[in-house]
Amino acid sequence: MPSNVAPAPGTGTSSAAGAVAAVPAEAVTPLIRGIAVLRRLTDADGVSSLSGLERSTGLARSTVDRITATLARRGYVRLDGRDAVLAPRLMELGNAYLAALRLPRLLDAQADALADELDESVSLAVGDQDGIRFIHQATRRRAMSLSFRIGDLLPAERTAPGPLFATEWGDREWARWRERRAADPEDRGFPAVPARSRPIEYGEDDRNDEKDRIGANRTNHTNRTNGKDLAATKDLTVAKDLTVGKDLAVGKSLAADRPEEPSAGRSARRRPTLGDDFEQRTAEAREAGWALDDQLIEPGLVALSMPVREAGRIACVVSVVSHTSRHTAADLRDTLLPRLREAVAAMERELREARHAESATSRTTAAPAGLAVWTGASKQELGREFIESLARGLTVITAFGEGRAELNLTEVAQATGLARATARRALITLEHLGYVTAHDRVFRLTPRVLGLGFPPLSRTSLAEIAAPHLTELSQRLHDSVSLAVLTGDEIQYTGRVSTSRVMSVHITVGTRLPAYPTALGRVMLADLPEPPLTELLPLTPRTITDPARLKAVLDRVREEGYALVDEELEVGLRSVAVPVRERGGRVVAAVNVAMHSSRRTPEECVAEVLPELRSTVGRIEEDLWVAGRFRRVPRT
């Protein structure tokens, strides 16, 4: 890696444990640097100042500025003053991996159903070298609930899935695991988990096992109590302690028996810490076919895991996660293991059936991405601030997807519209960084792709997705802009950007209003097969209260795709709204522009405001569709 790019933390691989592999001569340096910036932003939970990125990556400020400008042009980050913020569009990289993997599409629904049935959190994870990475989370909402996110990387030895994946490791994988453990004894390279406490060091002349040491001292204490001479007992264990253990002299009380810091001149060794029994747990998991996590991540967290196999290999691991206030680890095993076995069997049937169906269909090839046109326009707009090789390299990741899990060089070039030589250099770089693997000239994405922004973005709500778009629209129109969802026969405001006019609409997030006299409510009611049209009270002289007339209005709203309400909620208030649709076309929210009736006529609202409003909602929907491809996006 170039000397001015610091290795990214949280890799969970031997690269974090020692020497970093030499950068191939054909690697694309701007792509390496751009990915380093994305990783730092991910580790910073999605937002960092530009000066902070400069410090954490070791890159020059001018380089950071060019990288973030290119990523912003791509829609992967948003520049907010002096900060760079990860944007939902970045999730298309992780989506490419998840789509190619197939498992979320095939198994997510079953995991969700299992979580609902057991009323416990359920997760799906895949192995990522010497760690595990989540690909799905069905979390129960409680005061104490699971905070892991899709894409989070955990050390294998501190999880229930880890021993199961390790049953398929060879000598190389075990060696990498030991190197990483030695180089990172506190798991600082795994930001998603609490750090292990620093191991206590012992001298070479201390006992090899703390448990035996304490047991020997208890024998010592008992013998002294009975008035026996320790030397006459011929007790070799205690005699050895008396001979070589300078701190175990006769008459020393048990209260003083505790681990010591190594004294000068005594070589040190590690005390057993979390994960030191990993090889034993792996052997037990191989024999039992399941594994437990008894508070290895943090106190109170317990989990039971089983592997889901496809074609004889572990495809993923499904885990039921609970808290000790609800289950002990043993209770979790005894109570839920039979049901988990049934769920795993059903998942494996699903994979077999899908595999059979996929074998009967031809592999799809992605359509050209139009990258040349886009990069050309971007270069013309941004000039030297746009890094074309970075944009091209990231586009290579999106060439993979459903039906395109394995691609050769020609297929990648065709899918992206890149020249073969350009695609080849990008693939060499991505393979060096661990984001693709190559076998027999065929490339596959690795789970590490999920580490590019997916964890912090996977918890993004619709309100958070919409917020920057609402702000931009309000700044362009100089009017108040709102996002709302439908709750029964009311609307609830979930996003709001107000203007600072003397006469402006003052509504706060969380406010509820009846749906029928509002533009926001009407575009959402129009999407329902049977909208609730009861208790239509006259709020102003212009409020429509006749159900038949309101139904006709909703039919027109459904046909035209927008609603304009003029002084029906409040005299002097005029509003126009457009629905927000999820990936499947269902209306999940609405956005409006509200103003005093003196600012624009109804005709001007349609001619001037509506096009801007539709354009803004289109951008919100694009981000929502990317963010919601493999997870449920919370509406609030």
Image: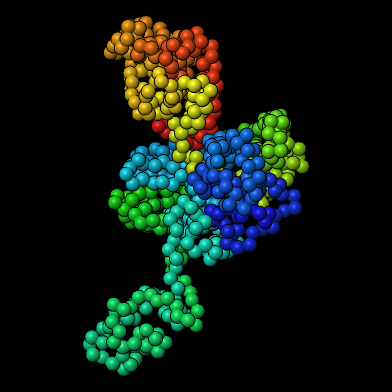
Where's residue 7, x and y in %? 60, 55
Q: Residue at x 42, y 28 (%)?
A: 495
Where's residue 131, x and y in %? 52, 54
Nearer the observer, 124 or 421: 421
Nearer the observer, 231 or 618: 618
Where's residue 517, x and y in %? 36, 14
Based on the displayed image, in which of its 4 quarters is residue 426 positioned?
Answer: top right
Q: Residue at x 77, y 42 (%)?
A: 421
Nearer the observer, 130 or 603: 603
| Quadrant of the drawing holding the N terminus | bottom right
> Does residue 276 sit above or below 94 in this rendering?
below
| Quadrant of the drawing holding the C terminus | top left
Based on the displayed image, in which of its 4 quarters is residue 92 positioned?
Answer: top right
Residue 226 visible? The answer is yes
Question: Quick check: 343 left or right of 215?
Answer: right
Based on the displayed image, in which of its 4 quarters is residue 219 positioned?
Answer: bottom left
Residue 402 visible? The answer is no
Q: Residue at x 37, y 29 (%)?
A: 509
